[in-house]
Amino acid sequence: MKTLPETFDKSGWHHEQKWRQGMVAIYSRWKETSRIPHYEVIRISENAEHEIGGVKIPASESYPTEKQWGTKGFTCMDWNAALDKAIELCAKEEQKATK
């Protein structure tokens, strides 16, 4: 399975993974013009291998989409808030696994 990269750039933002436990991660995110980061706490999705127009797309992890923000992705302005949210998401994942 192709995993999320630890660093990537998208739409003028630089993303760098700072923490990951299972399928929950924290990325710092900033624009090169400011270098002041905020944090994105995400629930990583898994996508099965599939085919589009005869082209096989391998199984991969994905970052939440804009539509998933608020359910699988959360923005925090400081590290402590991000870590608290990540721990909360991990606890919810553990609860699901034990049911």
Image (tube, grey):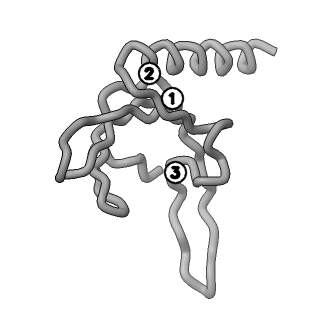
In the image, what residue type sits under mark 3?
A: Ser
The image quadrant of residue 53 is: bottom right
Callout 1: SS: strand
> Looking at the picture, does residue 74 appear above or below residue 99?
below
Pointer 2 or 3: first along the chain: 3
Mark 3 lies on residue: 62
**Residue at image location 51% in from the left, 54% down from the top:** 60
Determine the residue located farthest toward the bottom in the rendered image. 53
Mark 2 lies on residue: 82
Dot 1: within a 10 Å radius of its alpha carbon, few (fewer than 14), some, or many (20 or more) residues? many
Q: Nearer the viewer, mark 2 or mark 3?
A: 2
**Residue at image location 62% in from the left, 79% down from the top:** 52
Q: Are marks 2 and 1 in contact (CB under 8 Å)?
A: no
Give the camera-side residue of 45 and 49. 45
Q: Taking 3 as reference, is 85 left or right?
A: right
The image quadrant of residue 82 is: top left
Q: Which mark is residue 24?
A: 1
Callout 3: SS: strand
> Looking at the picture, does residue 31 appear above or below residue 35?
below
Image quadrant containing the C terminus: top right
> Looking at the picture, does residue 83 appear above or below residue 69?
above
